[in-house]
Image (tube, helix red, strand yellow):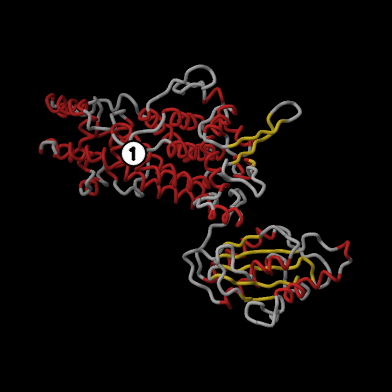
Amino acid sequence: MIPRIHQQGSNTLGLLHYLYGKGTHEEHIDPHLVASFDGMAPDPGRAPSVTKKDLQHLLDQPLSLLAADQRPDKHVWHCSVRAAPDDPILSDGQWAEIARRMVAATGIDPGDGAGCRWTAVRHAEDHIHIIATLVREDGRRPDHHRSGKRAQAEARLIEADYGLHRIPPGDGTAAKRPTSAERHKAERQGRERTAREELRETVRRAVAGAATEAEFFDRLKAAGLLVRTSVLPSGDLRGYTVAMPGDRNKDGEPVFYAGSTLAPDLSLPRIRDRFNTAAVASAPGSVGRQDHGAVQQSTPSTSRRTATHAAWAALLVIDHGDDGAAAAQIAATGEVLDALAKTSALHTRQQLCEAAWAFERASRSHTRAEFRHSQQLRRAARDLVHSGPALGRGEDGATTAMLIDTLFFLALAAAHWHAQRQHAQQAAAARQAAEHLRAAYQAAAAQPLGALYQRGRRLGRPLLQRQTAMLREAVPELAEQILTEPGWYALAATLTDTEAAGHDPTALLADAAGRRELDTADSVSDVLVWRLRRTTDLPADTSHAVTDAHTAQYSASRVWQQAPGRSGARRGRS
């Protein structure tokens, strides 16, 4: 149940003409009144002798109690209440009760016998519109302060009482929803998203990993946006606005939006909070500064592996760090998702874009993010952007799967963190992002895990038996489940590579299984494959001959016969 308080107006009759009209796309069906302040208001939709002017006159009568100079300029209050797409169709009587509860909760008609005059019109199965005059029967103004929040609170109660889809309560940190005019404009232009939504996504991608204001604005212009900046008397930038070249008003001028109206964290001061030039642009491993000579560009596979390490480190901070550090890691995770979606291969792009879009809501809360704690993750986002698009195969594709696997657990950790702090909308958004990441992972992992699977199936019986014994020793509580998974052969091949590289696979396997929960994994063996290959810096794509050579060398030298108890992994452990 989604209530929305619209901008106050001054034309009661004009709004009634819209509510009882055919709609902008003939979408209004059988407009009629379902409730009113006294239960007896005339209905222009069902009574042929009643006009919209009659209803307007009745609603606006309390204005005559006031002198002309005392009447409010904006006296029309307008609220729409919409059911969720999966809710059952409600009857007129149910919508009437919902309307009465809404006007009581918002202070329009609190039930004291002298409330405002109002009426509720239904012209579609899934929503109603409530129109009221903001002067009470006793001539006073109604107490409708914060009516939007009060309507939302009542909607949560209505959902519970009627068994409707439950929408998590908000905390005021969500991005502003597009207006109905913006939605209709997008429909007329054949766009799936409104200009406001497309701009928000583009600006977020421009923020991802940016180290300076100059880099941020350069990215906005490179994305094709029109950019305006405002300057303080001191010469410092005060703010910015952006517009899409094709989005114009009735006068043919571009429609500009301030960053703060796109999302609370996209104002210039909030974006500046993320910048730490010394940490992002100049730290070891960074791609360098664009505005000071050539950029040292990493490969897509290298940037993805680096991002995987950074994401794993962020997991530990979210689990054990203070709230400011955890909030910063969650916000920076949004930057990594934006950067990854921007540079992803075609077969994973849609799901990664959806994951980034969903996680956007999870990246903001009232907990102040201390971005000095998240520069490693922001640097990883920067590397992803500058390394360019990745191929969907080979090491690029395999390291993409490795990164998505870690980001899936990072999204779940963010959901848990938010849930513990009663951030219901953010927790739901993080879980939704995790589901999109799960789907993206399945697309990205098919080829590299297929190659590992084939290598595992080709291992000799004695070696597979030894790998089985190793598995049961390292993770006895998970061994039987793993042995029934198709991914077991990929894990067996990875254990072979791990020992060939000079590590103790039993110790590493036990460590990998104990580092993070595995209950949410579709395939435990898949997760352990990526954790082992990340920890030991093994190639993620095993179709290369060098990996087969390692296996041949390992089999010839019978490394597995070495005495147990030697040191564990000697490099790359995080």
- Residue nearest the viewer, comparing 481 with 533: 533
- Residue 178 point in image, percent of width and height: 59, 52
Which of the image's four quarters has the N terminus?
Answer: bottom right
- Residue 330 point in image, percent of width and height: 50, 40
Residue labelled with disc 1: 401
Q: Secondary structure at mark 1?
A: helix
Corner quadrant of residue 566: top left
Residue at x 44% of width, y 37% of height: 342
Question: Does residue 335 appear to the left or right of 447 in the view shown?
Answer: right
Q: Is residue 245 above or below residue 550?
A: below
Residue projecting furthest to the left:
461
Can residue 551 be seen here? Answer: yes
Question: Does residue 211 appear to the left or right of 349 in the view shown?
Answer: right
- Residue nearest the viewer, comparing 498 with 252: 252
Q: Is residue 51 above or below residue 70?
A: below
- Residue 123 point in image, percent of width and height: 58, 71
